[in-house]
Image (cartoon, rainbow, N blue to C red):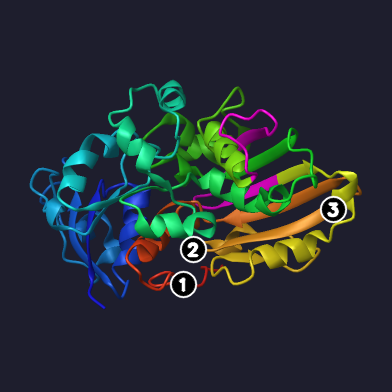
Amino acid sequence: MSAVRIGIVGGTGYTGVELLRLLVRHPHADLRAITSRKEAGMQVAEMFPSLRGHTDLRFSTPDEAPLADCDVVFFATPHGVAMNQARTLLAAGVRIIDLAADFRLRDTATFERWYGMPHACPDLLAEAVYGLPEFNRQAIRKARIVGNPGCYPTTVQIGFAPLLRTAGLVDRSHLIANCASGVSGAGRKAELGYLFAEAADNFKAYGVKGHRHGPEINQELRRIAGLSDDDAALSCLFVPHLVPMIRGMHSTLYARLTAEGQEADLQAMYASAYAGEPFVDVLPAGSAPETRSVRGANVLRLAVHKPTPDTAMILVVQDNLTKGASGQAVQNMNIMFGLPETAGLDLPALLP
């Protein structure tokens, strides 16, 4: 099996170094380039000593990097970068996996409203595939462009999907996602709210009036339920929180069960839905998953509860940088190039 030639645009952030951590040990990865305008010429291992002895790559500018010679390019960049470089790379036969939001939202007006910029290539947006492997494998396999899901939306979709696929089990108009993430979810930047003295010993909600992941969550939950993207019959209230840890994500999801749903065996339903999924772990009944059980691993663990006869509660944990971002991106790459889906990702979590 030939190696996949890989380029990474934007390699100095947390998702960039997480991609490197996974790809330097991937048995079929040939890292050709990693870009950074500011750090061009610097050895990657100089910025990230954890990679000493694993790569001799140096950062290069996007103009100098041999991206057109790659099979796939990952964009670990701010929103708006991938869509402006997509046409050139696609014309050279390069496939794209974007870890930002350029190719997640199918409606350009919705994208422009939430991200404050015009979409540079609506025609390419129309062909992009939403990269949640558990639901979209066949489309991902053939895709030229994959929009890697947001971290929160991954937990919410995998958590709610079994309840939504069968009509009549829950009140689809009253879904609640109460989610919390570590500070690395905000990216590698010097910003007051994420300084140690500001974020430590603290817990707070943010984006209460509306968060960018909200439209993505509702778009994809409607798709899972077989509804149109704007069908108001399904609505999920999403509230994110910041917790004082570096990496990790916990989502508590609530759905009101109908009379039919109250009769369903939820544990068996979830176990059946994710049987054979290498990166979704349905825990035994009564469990409460912990974020440390997924630290550094490309696995999502969930537990199903029924605290009252008419309420389903799903507890979901993942590492926001791995299954929530870079690990999922590598999972998508494996599918796109016909590799074993677990290649380079069969790492146990780090504990303690």
Picture coordinates of residue 286 (x, y %)?
81, 63
Say whether residue 242 is visible: no
Residue that appears at 13% across and 57% down: 69
Residue that appears at 35% across and 69% down: 338
Disc 1 to disc 2, how far (Cα)? 7 Å
Picture coordinates of residue 283 (x, y %)?
71, 67
Q: Nearer the viewer, residue 253 or 2?
A: 2
Disc number placed over residue 347 in the picture, else none: 1
Q: Nearer the viewer, residue 223 or 333?
A: 223
Q: Quadrant location of residue 178?
A: top right
Name the outermost residue toward the left: 64
Q: Residues within 10 Å of mark 2 (few under 14, many from 20)?
A: many
The amino acid marked with disc number 3 is Lys
The amino acid marked with disc number 1 is Leu
Which residue is labeled 3 in the image? Answer: 306
Which residue is labeled 2 in the image? Answer: 298
Disc 2 to disc 3, how far (Cα)? 27 Å
CB contact under 8 Å: marks 1 and 2: yes
Disc 1 to disc 3, how far (Cα)? 32 Å
Magenta range:
225-252
